[in-house]
Image (spheres, rainbow, N blue to C red):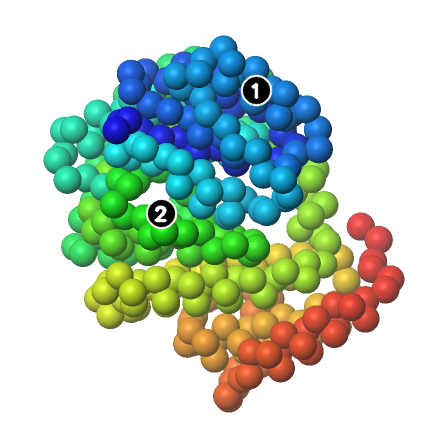
Amino acid sequence: MKSLSIIVPVYNSEAYLEDCLNSLVLQDVLDFEVIIVDDNSSDNSLDIIKKYCELLPDIFKYIHLDENKGVSVARNIGLKYASGEYIGFVDSDDFIHRNMYGDMLALTKMCKGLKVVSTGVQRVLEKDSSKSFIESDCDNISPIIIDVSKNPDFLCYESPACCNKIYRRDLFNEEPFIPSVKWEDIAFVYPTILKASVIGFIPSNYYFYRSNSKGIMASCLNVNEDIFDIFKVCDGITMQTINDGTYYSYKEEIRKIQIISCLDRLREIYNWNISNDKKMEILNEFNKLIISKYGTYTIGEDSEEFSFIKELDDFVGTVNEDDVKRKVLSNIRDISNPLDC
């Protein structure tokens, strides 16, 4: 058994894939493997993958899918081939610091029985060179061990991303990622942390998330018909924690995570480039569904970020999710002339 398996789902990542794989080669870990799952890329990603597998066959292995399945399925398939005691995930357009996995595994040896280790995430722009980040010196900050049962509020501050963490393989169900949904990490990360109960945290920013700021801004303005996926994800947290036997011990913390995750989608709707009347109608229906499913919540009076919520209706009766979804999607599809930016 390897000490660590790293799963890298790839889809049309030729521009950044070598940066990602080079950062894995540099890891200070003696006994690890990288399982690359090519999700039927149409660019040169597969050629790059084959090159690394030929040069370093003891480290790199790949699986090619004949049709595009999405990141959740790619990760689930990668897990079936992984042999490591611990599992990590890296997205193919991101990269990691040379010390990341070595420090994480060292912490698991210092604290026997530690099943999850997390680290900080740093956003870098699409054009940034990976080399200066990968090889730079990071602040030597002492790791922290958090007992979630004694500090349940920690959950609300922990990143929902799966890629800045490692997990002992006995935490995994057969297919831990929900297929064909957006924000799939949320339904995986929080139940897994609760199942582990204790998590190690290395404060250094070891994981580098590459983002295109213009692309993010544009996508936030676009109407997103997948917005209701967040309810599948949040309900997935409930189902998984019930199956794991942790739900009733952390019911209120789970509810907070579900509401926070949904508020992020409210913010997204608020930024859509549509008329204010249509936007407020959609926000109102979406908010009613949040409260109906997960209960009421309060927003601080000084919170400018969510000031628009004050305009929504206060009364919420019984709400049928299918009816709300049908009404909102009908509104979305009626939008034919978005406002100019």
Q: Disc 1 marks which residue?
A: 50
Q: Secondary structure at mark 2?
A: loop
Q: Nearer the viewer, residue 277 or 125?
A: 125
User: Where is 177 relative to 302, above or below?
Assistant: above
Q: Are there few (<14), some (14-19), or many (20+) residues within 10 Å of tag 1? A: some
Is 288 situated above or below 221?
Answer: below
| Quadrant in which residue 98 is drawn | top left
Which type of secondary structure does the marked residue at label 1 adopt? helix
Residue that appears at 44% across and 34% down? 7
Is 115 on the left-hand or right-hand side of 157?
left
Q: Earlier in the sequence, mark 2 or mark 1?
A: 1
Counting from the top left corner in percent of width and height, residue 23 is at 46, 19
> Distance between the Cα atoms at labels 2 and 1?
36 Å
Q: Quadrant of residue 312?
A: bottom right
Mark 2 is on which residue type? Glu
Q: Residue at x 21, y 29 (%)?
A: 107
68 lies above or below 188: above
- The residue that label 2 is drawn on is 158
> What x and y, as percent, mark residue 328?
68, 73
